[in-house]
Image (cartoon, rainbow, N blue to C red):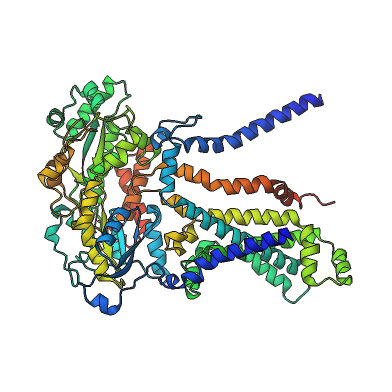
């Protein structure tokens, strides 16, 4: 009897849970990825901000959402945090199954070409948004424009990148840890390689200049003003230039044989095996502090030879099918130019909206960098040198193929730049048969 | 001689057990360290970062994800085991038209990768207004082709027709025959398929990723994946979440391992 009662109660509990998630959420279930309570008439009026929107992100931005909801009574923003690696899978499956996308989506620098090419995002410079792009840091504008020339994204942050270095290793092997003297010393990449060969000799091959060929790629790619894929055609000469540069670094023996994004690569930030690391403005919180907790005061930052470069980036996009564009746009503005951007600035990000690059805001001394004003280096010295190539729908395929080729170059030192080019072209054509080769 | 042989066997078993257990132990140790410590090299000693990792995992509503996973997996297991046993019983003990054809079709569906039918399944769920509920992650396991095949084979080999006939002669209904006569005969097979269904459902990642758009309904694998960043992943916290995620499975396998092994080996030797 007792057992039957327990079974019955367990059954009732289970069914309650299921119906709680099911029929009780019947209204939710109709949203299929979003819930918009803004009516058509509300949407017609961009000044009337109310109702509910949903967004898919890959990290939590609750601080900005809570601040927005507090200052905008009658609004509700539902955030769904999706695994960064599966973000595009979710979007593609939702589209393929005829589902409805959320009101707001994110585009990462690697996959936004794919996202833009899906033709699911509104042009933010057109009605009803009328984005004034003069309010945005000008160097990031190319990352917001699709291949049709429409501004379908709004970049959240700027991501200027430079060369970070470990002061103790620099002092030991380069004779100084002063950023100005290092900048004077390393005037070109050829000079960088020459110095690296000396370091290699002095350390008995134990210390390298960079950790990974991936690091070399990020710098070379970021500094290149030539597109590898232009008008649906692979530019062989540009590809060759890239791999020739990578091979020069590799063959000089100044790069450790560690693959990028592996645990060993992350560990290298806390190790004593390489002096320099390319570092984006978000690198302090994402790469250095988590992996070098004892390294406070031991880091320095310089502008790389030939200037800085961009690394990564996340943009907002408003989906064409959004039923509450007024609220979606108002939140994007809040996050980009208003209090939401202030919150993010306080958390260490540098919003792309004008005003976040003022002298007073970037002149803080950073204790991790031994009091160096890294904001000033990023904003005043690196940012003006940045050039970003246009976004293409092949960007994601390109980076996946590049990583494959780099891995091969890393594993096989006999592989030449020409071999790398051949491998790149054949892999790219396997994955995107419509690509032509020039 | 036999004593020496016994010691040798014990030594081999000890080494095998050690090899099997050490990754699990390492997972527990790693869940108490910082991500930086993980990357510095392997250590077999616990760290001092457990509370911080717990805080990171806790900040992602992991408790809620846990309950959702428990509800979904329990429902999938209970319903899936029952339907598998019933279908297996029907296909093995009843004679009806197209019986063999139906059995073959069920087995054939096992050859089709589930990814192929994913889009169609999502469309189906939408038409039934079941998206954004836990049902889409439960239903695929409630009618499981392998479960049907497994129970069909088990019932066929383990339940004598004479015993069923005797029960019928004594006035037992077909449901009574099924629950009181057939199921006790195939207890090990039943527990085996229940454990497998729970395991598959618990570890399921793709279906909840595609069909759930409400974080209140996220399951454990989605919760663990949430700890992935684009450029930074807190691996230590992620390993702690994984360790927490394996607890129900470990408990179930501890209690069910005897039946599980018996279920797997029941067809191996026929007397």
Q: Residue at x 17, y 33 (%)?
A: A372
Vertical relation: A58 (above or below) B138: above
Residue A155 visible? The answer is: no
The one nearer the camera, A232 or A308, is A308
Q: What residue is shown at x 80% (from left), y 67% (from top)?
A: B177
At a point 72% along the width and 58% down the height, the residue shown is A3
Visible residue check, residue B29:
yes
Question: Residue A75's spot in the image, x, y percent?
Answer: 29, 66
Left or right relative to A380: residue B148: right
Please state which of residues B87 and A333 is positioned toward the viewer in this rendering.
Answer: A333
**Residue A220: x percent and y percent?**
23, 43
Name which residue lies at 74% across and 49% down: B262
Where residue A348 appears, x then y in whole percent?
A: 24, 45
Classify residue B94 as left or right of residue A366: right
> Would you say B139 lies left or right of B222 here?
right
Between A217 and A266, the residue placed more toward the observer is: A266
């Amino acid at each position: 009897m007792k057992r039957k009662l327990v079974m019955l109660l367990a059954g009732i509990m289970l069914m309650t849970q299921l119906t709680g998630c099911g029929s009780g959420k019947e209204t939710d279930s109709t949203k299929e990825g979003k819930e918009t309570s803004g009516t058509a008439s509300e949407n017609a009026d961009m000044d009337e901000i109310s109702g509910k929107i949903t967004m898919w992100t890959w990290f939590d931005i609750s601080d900005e959402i809570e601040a927005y909801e507090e200052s905008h009574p009658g609004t509700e923003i539902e955030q769904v945090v999706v695994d960064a690696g599966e973000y595009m899978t979710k979007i593609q499956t939702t589209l393929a199954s005829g589902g409805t996308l959320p009101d707001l989506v994110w585009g990462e620098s690697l996959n936004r070409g794919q996202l833009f090419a899906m033709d699911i995002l509104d042009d933010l410079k057109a009605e009803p948004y009328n984005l004034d792009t003069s309010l945005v840091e000008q160097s990031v504008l190319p990352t917001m424009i699709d291949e049709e020339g429409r501004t379908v994204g709004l970049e959240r942050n700027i991501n200027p990148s430079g060369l970070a270095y470990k002061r103790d290793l620099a002092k030991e092997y380069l004779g100084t840890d002063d950023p100005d003297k290092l900048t004077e010393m390393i005037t070109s990449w050829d000079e960088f390689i020459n110095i690296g060969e000396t370091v290699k000799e002095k350390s008995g091959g134990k210390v390298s200049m960079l950790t990974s060929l991936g690091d070399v790629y990020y710098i070379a790619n970021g500094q290149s003003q030539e597109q590898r894929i232009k008008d649906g055609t692979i530019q062989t000469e540009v590809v060759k230039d890239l791999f020739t540069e990578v091979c020069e670094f590799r063959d000089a023996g100044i790069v450790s044989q560690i693959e990028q994004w592996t645990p060993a690569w992350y560990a290298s930030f806390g190790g004593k095996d390489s002096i320099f690391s390319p570092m984006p403005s978000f690198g302090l919180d994402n790469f250095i502090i988590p992996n070098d907790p004892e390294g406070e005061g031991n880091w320095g930052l310089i502008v790389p030879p030939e200037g800085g470069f961009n690394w990564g980036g996340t943009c907002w996009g408003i989906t064409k099918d959004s039923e509450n564009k007024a609220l979606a746009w108002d939140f994007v503005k809040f996050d980009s130019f208003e209090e939401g951007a202030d919150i993010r600035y306080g958390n260490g990000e540098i919003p792309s909206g004008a005003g976040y690059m003022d002298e007073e805001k970037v002149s803080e001394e950073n204790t991790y960098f031994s009091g160096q004003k890294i904001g000033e280096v990023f904003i005043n010295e690196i940012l003006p040198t940045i050039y970003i190539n246009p976004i293409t729908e092949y960007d994601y395929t390109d980076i996946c193929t590049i990583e494959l080729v780099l891995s091969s170059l890393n594993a096989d030192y006999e592989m030449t730049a020409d071999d790398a080019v051949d491998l790149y072209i054949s892999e790219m054509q396997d994955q995107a048969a419509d690509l032509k080769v020039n | 001689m036999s004593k020496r042989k016994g010691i040798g066997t014990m030594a081999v078993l000890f080494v095998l057990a050690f090899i099997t257990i050490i990754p699990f132990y390492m997972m527990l140790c790693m869940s108490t360290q910082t991500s930086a410590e993980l990357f510095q090299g392997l250590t077999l000693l616990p760290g001092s970062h457990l509370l911080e990792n717990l805080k990171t995992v806790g900040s992602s509503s992991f408790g809620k994800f846990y309950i959702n996973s428990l509800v979904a997996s329990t429902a999938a297991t209970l319903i899936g085991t029952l339907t598998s046993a019933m279908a297996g019983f029907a296909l093995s003990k009843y004679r009806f038209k197209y019986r063999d054809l139906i059995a073959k079709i069920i087995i054939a569906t096992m050859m089709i990768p589930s990814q192929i039918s994913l889009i169609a399944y999502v469309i189906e769920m939408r038409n039934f207004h079941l998206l954004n509920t836990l049902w889409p992650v439960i239903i695929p396991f409630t009618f499981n082709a392998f479960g049907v095949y497994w129970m069909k084979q088990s019932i066929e080999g383990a339940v004598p027709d004479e015993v069923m006939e005797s029960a019928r002669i004594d006035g037992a209904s077909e449901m009574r025959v099924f629950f009181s006569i057939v199921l006790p005969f195939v207890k090990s097979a039943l527990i085996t398929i229940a454990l497998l269904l729970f395991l598959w459902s618990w570890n399921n990642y793709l279906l909840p990723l595609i069909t759930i758009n409400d974080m209140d309904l996220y399951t454990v694998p989605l919760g663990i994946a949430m700890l992935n960043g684009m450029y930074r992943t807190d691996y230590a916290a992620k390993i702690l979440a994984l360790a927490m995620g394996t607890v129900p499975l470990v408990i179930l396998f501890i209690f069910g391992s005897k039946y599980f092994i018996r279920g797997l080996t029941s067809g191996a030797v026929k007397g």
